[in-house]
């Protein structure tokens, strides 16, 4: 088997092509930590790289974003890049895409960023986002002229924990409850804010992100109107507004011309109770001697200013139009029943009468035009706000100022309570991203209560013999290698199973090496991601379950504990098919 691997590599090397790609490279380490939210208020949290929020990741449209995610939590975790339409294998939803990342292990998320704008990242595991694991992704356009001009770029990230009676940035699943329940802006309470310094005449681009678990806000800057330029990262024709509603998971970019010197409150209220400031930042003009506003001060435009509405939005040129004859139309009726649900509570929230995981996925075919018609049913579901998010695709909103020719684009849509404008809505999207994609309410409690389903493609886009809805990476024809998601599989004396997903009857050789700092492309085999010395780890054949399985047991004691290895497989056949390198995976025995 060793000779076979070496022979294949040697042949491929003769016609290897050097592939150079501009890469935005980051490492995110998720771990428990201590954060200071304000004067005298230090709490335990789950954090990325020891900070709250996590680092802002920056990339350019068309660039490869590579994130090495290291899980130092006590539970499995993942990364979902909210609003970025990458291939399905990188979507970070355990149970739908690849398995979660086990405690003590890591995974490298790598994909091309197709759109510019404001996005964000968070785990898709239980309450870890609520516990502090979130951060912004800022993507610059390839051509800067497509964005309106501005001088300063300021992220504004809102977050809460009103879910756990045990505390803010706590976590019933992670044992870090702290006793504080409240709201923060850029990781600080109102009393912990460092003023945002501006100068007269500056054009400041505020990137507003609602990373809250449950809260939906209204945001306003006292003394200043806002010119909204982007909805969920996508450019819209500029609209001036006094106050900005922002549901959980939504993003709005707004430019503010600084033409009113002073020290001002950038305040957020609850969307349903605009007369109380929940948290606020401070915007201070250079040289101003004005007093810092009280944390409880409620700006007039926050409490009574006109709110931006979806109906005012219109997209810029190039947006696909609304069609009067969609290929598929699905009602999306949000309802409730008593009993059951993932959270085990007294009430279950449903989409079309079904609650996760007991659901029937919605079918798609590549290039379908799909229309979703949202509404609520029943008193309980109708009393709530529901931010509905679709992974891997972009909604085009219907019934807006953009009409059918220039609809605005978003990936998260806030459905309002019964009796309010926005209680019903219709959107369309193009089925242009094969795989299986999560569709859910971004209120974390509603999600736990059952408000999830998936959209599932039926073909085989990469022609690798695996249907899109079961393929762990439906746009890459190479086999996919995964490791267990439980910590017990990596300790001395533990056991686990390496799986390589490939079409039935494929022979698979597994190899162990070290992660390569300079991966080598071998078209059409794929990319060799591990360096020697190579150790042959066995051969298996994929079966009807589409996996070649490699069981293993960790010696006890294990003399190489803590060493970072790399795993990669080579597939052979069936029927003389071209050999392929699998995806690779780092692995550490600890």
Image (cartoon, rainbow, N blue to C red):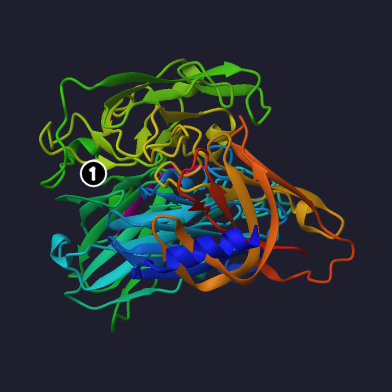
Position in image of residue 152 (x %, y %): 26, 72
Number of marks: 1
Q: Which residues are magenta?
A: 214-221
| Residue 258 rendering spot, x and y as whole percentages | 20, 70
**Is disc 1 surrounded by few (<14), some (14 to 19) or many (20+) residues within 10 Å?**
few
Is residue 570 located in the magenta-colored stretch of the structure? no
Image x and y of residue 118, in percent: 33, 57
The answer to whether residue 242 is seen in the rendering is: no
Tell which of 112 and 295 is nearer to you. 112
Pick the residue in front: 240 or 104: 104
Extreme residue toward the bottom, this view: 287
Q: Looking at the image, can residue 255 be seen?
A: yes
On the image, which quarter does residue 468 sit in? top left
Helix, strand or loop under label 1: loop
Q: In the visual, does 57 lie left or right of 323?
A: right
- Residue to which mark 1 is pinned: 306
**Which is more toward the observer, 440 or 583?**
583
The outermost residue toward the right is: 556
Residue 337 place in picture, x, y as percent: 57, 16
User: In which quadrant is the C terminus drawn?
Assistant: bottom right
Q: Is residue 207 above or below residue 382?
A: below
Q: The N terminus is located in which quarter?
A: bottom right
Q: Is residue 92 above or below residue 207?
A: above
Which one is in front, 372 or 556? 556
């Amino acid at each position: 088997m060793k000779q076979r691997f070496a022979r294949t590599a040697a042949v491929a090397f003769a016609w290897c092509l050097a592939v150079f790609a501009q890469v935005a490279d980051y490492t995110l380490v998720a771990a428990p930590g201590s954060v200071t939210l304000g004067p005298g208020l230090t709490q335990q949290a789950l954090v990325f790289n020891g900070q709250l929020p996590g680092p802002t990741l920056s990339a350019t449209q068309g660039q490869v974003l590579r994130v090495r995610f290291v899980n130092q939590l006590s539970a499995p975790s993942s990364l979902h890049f909210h609003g970025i339409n990458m291939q399905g294998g990188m979507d970070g939803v355990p149970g739908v895409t690849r398995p979660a990342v086990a405690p003590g292990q890591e995974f490298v998320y790598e994909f091309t960023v197709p759109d510019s704008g404001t996005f964000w990242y968070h785990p898709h595991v239980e309450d870890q986002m609520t516990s502090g694991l979130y951060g912004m992704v800022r993507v610059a356009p390839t051509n800067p002229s497509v964005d309106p001009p501005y001088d300063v770029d300021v992220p504004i990230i809102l977050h809460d924990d009103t879910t756990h009676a045990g505390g803010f940035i706590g976590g019933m699943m992670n044992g870090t409850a702290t006793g504080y329940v409240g709201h923060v802006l850029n990781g600080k309470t109102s009393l912990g804010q460092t003023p945002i310094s501006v100068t007269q005449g500056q054009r400041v681009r505020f990137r507003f992100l609602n990373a809250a678990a449950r809260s939906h806000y209204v945001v306003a800057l006292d003394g200043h109107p806002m010119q909204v330029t982007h909805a969920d990262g996508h450019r819209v024709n500029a609209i001036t507004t006094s106050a900005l509603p922002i549901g959980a998971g939504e993003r709005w970019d707004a430019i503010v011309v600084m033409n009113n010197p002073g020290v001002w409150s950038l305040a957020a209220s609850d969307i349903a109770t605009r007369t109380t400031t929940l948290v606020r930042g401070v915007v201070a003009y250079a040289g101003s001697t004005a007093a810092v506003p009280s944390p409880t001060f409620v700006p007039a435009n926050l409490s009574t200013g006109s709110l931006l509405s979806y109906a005012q939005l219109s997209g810029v040129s190039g947006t696909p139009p609304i069609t009067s004859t969609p290929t598929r139309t699905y009602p999306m009726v949000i309802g409730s029943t008593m009993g059951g649900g993932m959270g085990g509570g007294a009430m279950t929230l449903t989409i079309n009468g079904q609650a996760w995981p007991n659901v029937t996925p919605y079918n798609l075919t590549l290039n379908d035009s799909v229309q979703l018609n949202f509404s609520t049913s029943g008193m309980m579901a109708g009393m709530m706000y529901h931010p509905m998010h679709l992974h891997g695709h972009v909604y085009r909103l219907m019934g807006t100022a953009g009409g059918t020719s220039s609809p605005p684009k978003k990936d998260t849509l806030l459905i309002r309570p019964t009796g309010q404008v926005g209680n019903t809505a219709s959107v369309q999207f193009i089925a242009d991203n094969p795989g299986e994609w999560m569709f859910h309410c971004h209120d974390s409690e509603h999600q736990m209560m059952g408000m999830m389903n998936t959209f599932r493609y039926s073909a085989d886009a990469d022609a690798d013999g695996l249907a899109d809805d079961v393929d762990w990476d439906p746009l890459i024809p190479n086999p996919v290698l995964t490791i267990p998601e439980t910590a017990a599989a990596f300790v001395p004396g533990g056991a686990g199973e390496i799986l390589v997903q490939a079409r039935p009857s494929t022979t698979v050789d597994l190899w162990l090496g070290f992660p390569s700092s300079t991966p080598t492309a071998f078209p059409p085999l794929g990319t060799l991601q591990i360096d020697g010395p190579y150790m042959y780890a066995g051969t298996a054949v994929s079966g009807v379950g589409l996996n070649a399985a490699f069981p293993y047991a960790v010696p006890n004691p294990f003399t190489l504990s803590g060493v970072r290895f790399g795993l990669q497989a080579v597939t052979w056949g069936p029927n003389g098919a071209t050999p392929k390198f699998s995806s690779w995976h780092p692995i550490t025995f600890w």
